[in-house]
Image: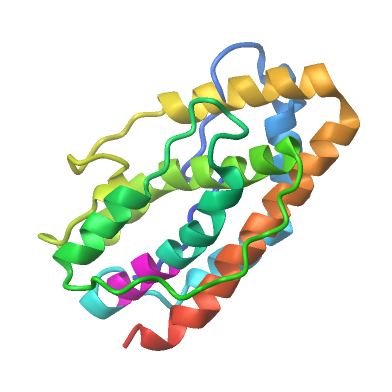
Amino acid sequence: MNAHHAIPESSTAMPGAAGGGVRARRNGARFHLRDVTRGEHDDTEAAFAPFDLSKPAGYRAFLQAHNGALAALEGPIEGRGWPEYASRRGLLEADLADLGDAERPSAMEPPALSGDAHVWGAQYVLEGSRLGGQILARQVAKGSPTRYLSGNDEAGTDDMRPWQEFCAALEDEARRHGPQWLADVEDGARATFRLFREAAKIFSGTTI
């Protein structure tokens, strides 16, 4: 089974955020971002399609690609954007260590995330992938470590709260700052999708 990146608003991963009516939720910033970045999302899923998570080499390459992208993102987003954001890179590196991979990720060019809104865009992608990862974890061979995809030291967690809390905070910020801020969020999300596609391209040749 091939891996999809499973980032925000995939049909299997993203129930609506809590609160408000259906029409109000679908008119919010979160759904706007889903719509305007749909092409980026789909292209990124296609880039990760060759990674077969049920096979050790494919799963390891998938984690290496994510590690490379996260290494490039950590500096620009650290201490910025959503105050509750927490990196999962430690969990990812623990999984790679269990798989016998202790190499540092390939150096990648950090995306241009100059403004705080750009960071929110990057975090939109990362928080969506956190929830989508819980679905991808089911594709991984039994006995393989899945801390990163599960989002916890214990495999099999299924907690919507971080995504719902992020979406609620995103809505508050969008109402407070207005359309230009949201446009910058879009740019940050697009840059993050591109970064993950580049990482997939680097490591897709190591999946066999």
Most frequent secondary structure within the magenta stretch: helix
Decide which of 72, 42 is in the foreground and name it.
72
Residue furthest toward the left?
143
Q: Is residue 96 left or right of residue 107?
A: left
Residue at coordinates 58% horizontally, 29% vertically from top-left? 82
Residue 95 appearing in the image:
yes
Vertical placement of residue 99 versus 37, above or below: below
Give left or right: position of 112 versus 44: right
- Tell me the residue at 79%/18% (across/down): 175
Left or right: 187 as drawn, with respect to 121 = right
Q: Is residue 192 magenta?
A: no
> For this rendering, which residue is in front, 28 or 11?
28
**Which residue sits at x=51%, y=24%?**
164
Task: Examine the image and state in which quarter residue 92 appears.
Answer: bottom left
For residue 63: magenta? yes
Give me the residue at 47% from left, 42% from top.
13
Expressed as whole percent of the image width and height from the top left, the position of residue 80 reads 60, 34
180 with respect to 169 (left or right):
right
- Residue 126, compared with residue 83, is above or below; it is below
Q: Which residues are magenta?
A: 58-65
Nearest to the observer: residue 150 or residue 17: 150
Q: In which quarter of the view is residue 18 placed? A: top right
Quadrant, the C terminus:
bottom left
